[in-house]
């Protein structure tokens, strides 16, 4: 069981979408700490063309208070630096999201030295998470749902990264990504993930309990009997 200081450590909730209505809805709930996006999520919303994509990031930043991860498309070091700088200059809430490949790690080190927040994404192993911490990434994103999809224990990866980061005092935040459902959120919280990012439905699932609905219906029925 991780020993986290409850006064300084709480689990952040990010929403994993580029859909503005869902971002607004999550923000209105009062539990949202940030947003993650990726090129597939942008495409799903029909946001295409560099200019529109950049504008969309700014719109998202203006809707929420926390960090907004914006992913580079380039896969070479120079391209990632150019694109990452453009993204970082868009808004102070932007976190530059880089793929966990050799040039992505180098670019993460470059940006960390410059004080730009980084999210290293597409992480599927403990070794990759170790590299992310070594270069001082702000966030590391292990994709637990996609690991589960290929019969590999996604939550187990979160536990292993937590153990290693705590052993050495790495400050990189574990951002449990590719969350598919509400139980993933609860299990990640038990394991001490610093952040989770998931669809709105996974967050809304936290509200639901049949006994709450039945209890409320009974309270209202009893009230009506006497009024
Ligand atoms: C993380 O930042 C990614 O956007 C995301 O969580 C991927 O999730 P998926 O496996 O549901 O596409």
Image: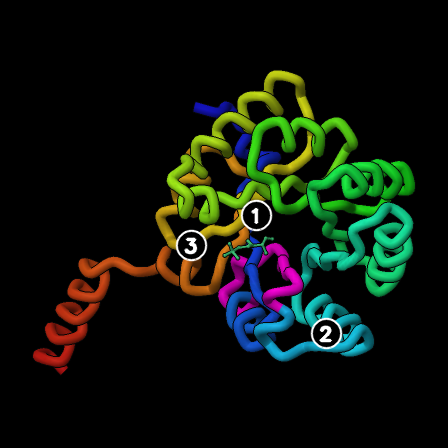
Labelled disc at residue 68: none
Which quarter of the image is occupied by the C terminus? bottom left
The residue singled out by tag 1 in the image is 12
Q: As rendered, which of 160 and 189 lies closer to the eye?
A: 160
The residue singled out by tag 3 in the image is 180
Q: Is residue 194 above or below residue 225?
A: above
Q: Is residue 186 above or below residue 34?
A: above
| Contact flag, marks 1 and 3 (Cβ < 8 Å) | no
Assess whether residue 38 is covered by the magenta stretch.
yes
* Residue pictured at 69% horizontal, 41% vertical: 100
Q: Residue furthest top?
A: 167
Badge 2: residue crowd in 10 Å (few <14, some 14–19, many ≥20): some
Q: Earlier in the sequence, mark 1 or mark 2?
A: 1
Mark 3 and mark 2: Cα distance apart in space: 24 Å
Point out the stretch of residues depicted in magenta.
27-41
Which quarter of the image is occupied by the N terminus? top left
Indicate if the residue with disc 2 has its beta carbon within 8 Å of ligand 1.
no
Q: As rendered, which of 76 and 25 lies closer to the eye?
A: 76
Labelled disc at residue 56: 2
Indicate if the residue with disc 3 has its beta carbon within 8 Å of ligand 1.
yes
């Amino acid at each position: 069981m991780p020993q986290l200081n409850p006064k300084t450590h709480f689990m952040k909730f990010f929403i994993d979408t580029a859909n503005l209505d869902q971002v607004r809805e999550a923000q209105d709930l009062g539990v949202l700490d940030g947003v993650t996006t990726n090129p597939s999520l942008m495409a799903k919303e029909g946001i295409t063309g560099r200019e529109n994509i950049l504008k969309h990031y700014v719109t998202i930043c203006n809707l929420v208070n926390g960090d907004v991860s914006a992913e580079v498309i380039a896969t070479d070091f120079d391209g990632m630096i150019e694109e990452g700088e453009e993204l970082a200059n868009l808004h102070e809430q932007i976190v530059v999201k880089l793929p966990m490949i050799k040039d992505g790690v180098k670019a993460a080190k470059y940006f960390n030295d410059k004080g730009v927040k980084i999210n290293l994404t597409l992480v599927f192993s403990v070794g990759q998470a170790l590299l992310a911490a070594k270069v001082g990434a702000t966030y590391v994103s292990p994709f637990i749902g996609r690991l589960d999809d290929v019969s590999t224990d996604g939550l187990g990866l979160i536990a292993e990264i937590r153990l290693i980061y705590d052993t050495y005092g790495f400050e990189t935040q574990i951002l449990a990504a590719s969350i598919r459902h509400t139980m993933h959120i609860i299990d990640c919280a038990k394991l001490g993930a610093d952040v989770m990012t998931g669809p709105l439905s996974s967050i809304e699932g936290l509200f639901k309990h049949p006994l709450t609905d039945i209890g409320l219906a009974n309270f209202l029925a009893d009230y009506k009997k006497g009024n």
